[in-house]
Image (tube, grey):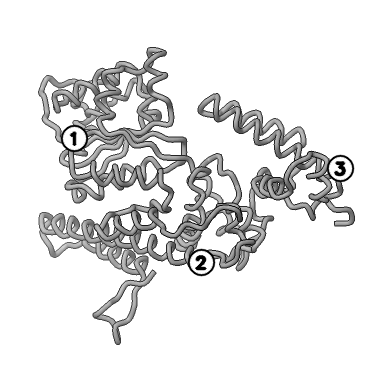
Amino acid sequence: MKLYNPGGERGSAMSYAALLEKIEIMRSTLRWATRIERPEVEKLLRQANTLRDEVMRLSHQARFVQALGAEAALEPVDGNDRGTDRRTAAEPQPTAAPAGERRQALLARSFVFEGTFGDNPRLLDALEIAEKAAPTDLPVLVDGESGTGKELMAKVIHANGARADKPYVSVNCGAIPDSLLESELFGHRKGAFTGAANDRKGKFESAHKGTIFLDEIGELPLPGQVKLLRVLQSHEIQRVGSDETISVDARIVAATNKNLRKLIEQGSFREDLFYRLSVIHVTLPPLRERRDEIPLLLAYYGDESAEALKRRPVALSQRLRDFLLQYAYPGNIRELRNLMYRIACLAGETADLSHLPEDIRPGASAGPGTIAAQAVQAAAASSLAEAKRAASDEAERSCLERGLQETGGTVTELARRWDMNRSHLQILLKKHGLHSKDFRKGH
């Protein structure tokens, strides 16, 4: 993505990445400046930071527009191409695109997307709620499966609000040991406990006037929940080892991949804290329910990974692209991003199915090792429903593979044996990345 550079020769173009690099060089030079007074250096650094953040915001928005254009160019013109997985031939084609209009309306209102894509109605519902909530100081609770982009949504709320130029502080509540939780959130005084060699600000003080993102809020232990509730009520904190109260003004956005209402029933989450945090409640759908977003994300992370690895974007073979468009992504957006980084790292100019991890590669055998890995994955599922879905998908795939082996890869014969519609069988094969030709004799 290029940025117009009026100062360049004949109005040359400069990439956002190149501009960010120049800003980083400028910031590094300022840090070690000897002829400028330190207060002036600090002021210039703050201005450079603001400029860098603004360029990054523009880059995110430009990537969104670019990816949207790429997806429009890839849209199939006939009814028997990849677009058939979105609607059957019997369904009437829509005369208007209200979802697209909603997304364009957000763009027209200068909404900052922060890397969120797609025109899935449920995703747009979440973005429109975020747009309305952003200018307020009301607490927001974001829930959804792991990897659906909950922190991105928190950044969207921060970037579109009145606090966009103030600090954004992220806290993973599940990663802080219970003994250090209070110190991490609220800070401590020197000598408050062994190892407290200096006064230290907590996360809430660091987020003063800005936004604090409390990720995995369902992992917060009950004593921490009590202290957090007190902050929400009084907007004051006390550092560990101090009797002094400190006023804090931080907008709270919390996120969880757990069902907090069930945790309340189990007695592991406070009901009063839940209602304090969920004044505005946003639910992010899993990626498998917003498949229209996948081509945009492939383009976005393909570009991002190439930039990060300082190489040209990798072309995807048709087989690999078809697989990536149909894959179920149990790890959601995070899994898709990691796959694109892996492909960008391992592939040359063109990537193929061989560059995928072996455990998800089409035609991978369901041997003992694979079954054991699937058992571990099911055990690690965040909910019973997710475990059931993973097990059901694997049973379906195994049945399809066995049927194709028995019929020598003849889809028509398999559909006849199972007394099912051939087109529906093809959809199931696409879902699991299975190709009938891989099961034909002599292949």
What is the quadrant of residue 442 in the picture? Answer: bottom right
Q: Is residue 96 left or right of residue 47?
A: right
The residue shown at (71%, 39%) is 397
Quarter of the N terminus within the rendering: bottom left
Residue designated by label 3: 406
- Inspect the image, locate mark 2, and give the three-letter code of the amino acid beneath it: Arg
Question: Where residue 194 sits in the image (x, y, percent)?
Answer: 28, 21
The first of marks 3 and 2 along the sequence is 2
What is the quadrant of residue 256 in the picture? Answer: top left
Q: Secondary structure at mark 2?
A: loop
The residue shown at (82%, 44%) is 416
The residue shown at (44%, 62%) is 67
Q: Which mark is residue 205?
A: 1
The residue shown at (41%, 59%) is 96
The first of marks 1 and 2 along the sequence is 1
Give above or below for 214 relative to 38.
Answer: above
* Local crowd size for mark 2, using a 10 Å CA cut-off: few (<14), some (14–19), many (≥20): some
Q: Which mark is residue 311?
A: 2
Q: Which mark is residue 85?
A: none
* Local crowd size for mark 1, using a 10 Å CA cut-off: few (<14), some (14–19), many (≥20): many
The first of marks 1 and 3 along the sequence is 1
Inter-mark Cα distance, 1 to 3: 66 Å
Using the image as rendered, state which of residue 105 and residue 92 is in the foreground.
92
Q: Secondary structure at mark 1?
A: helix
Question: Where residue 283 sits in the image (x, y, percent)?
Answer: 38, 36
Quarter of the C terminus within the rendering: bottom right
- Inspect the image, locate mark 1, and give the three-letter code of the amino acid beneath it: Glu
Give above or below for 341 relative to 364.
Answer: below
- Inspect the image, locate mark 3, and give the three-letter code of the amino acid beneath it: Glu
